[in-house]
Image (cartoon, grey):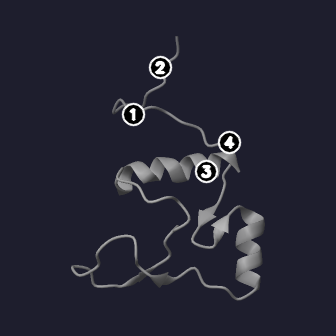
Amino acid sequence: MANLNDHMGRPIVAVTGIGVVTSLGVGKADNWAALTAGKSGIHPITRFPVDHLNTRISGMVDFLPSSSKGASLLTYDLAEIAAQE
């Protein structure tokens, strides 16, 4: 069987397509429509406390349900949404 890991033991992957998930929406059509309509995806951060941060704004993907998973695991949700596009 072929070795499916790189020299550091990490799995080798191939990206065969990409989807787009941004603070403006999911998919090329939603994002393009929002951009050309002059909409901004930058808003005050409301998902978590920002007292310790130097910024109070971001391009949050705020249409995902709140979760106790934490940011790292929410990354998988975003990847899954993009992959389904």
**Given the image, on which type of amino acid does mark 3 rest?**
Ile
Q: Is residue 13 left or right of residue 36?
A: left
Where, by quadrant of the figure, is residue 31 drawn? bottom right
- Residue matched to label 2: 3
**Which residue occupies the foreground of this view, 4 or 32?**
32
| 10 Å crowding of disc 1: few (<14), some (14-19), many (20+) | few
Identify the residue at horizontal 57%, vertical 46% (top origin): 80
**Given the image, on which type of amino acid does mark 1 rest?**
Arg
Where, by quadrant of the figure, is residue 15 drawn? top right
The disc at residue 16 is 4
The CA distance from mark 1 to mark 2 is 11 Å
> Is tag 3's residue or tag 4's residue first in the polypeptide sequence?
4
Q: Is residue 62 left or right of residue 51?
A: right
Identify the residue at horizontal 45%, vertical 52% (top origin): 75
Report the mark closest to the observer, 2 or 4. Answer: 4
Q: Is residue 22 above or below residue 83?
A: below
The disc at residue 81 is 3
Q: Determine whether the residue tagged by mark 3 lies in a helix, strand or loop.
A: helix
**Given the image, on which type of amino acid does mark 2 rest?**
Asn
Report the mark closest to the observer, 3 or 1. Answer: 3
The disc at residue 25 is none
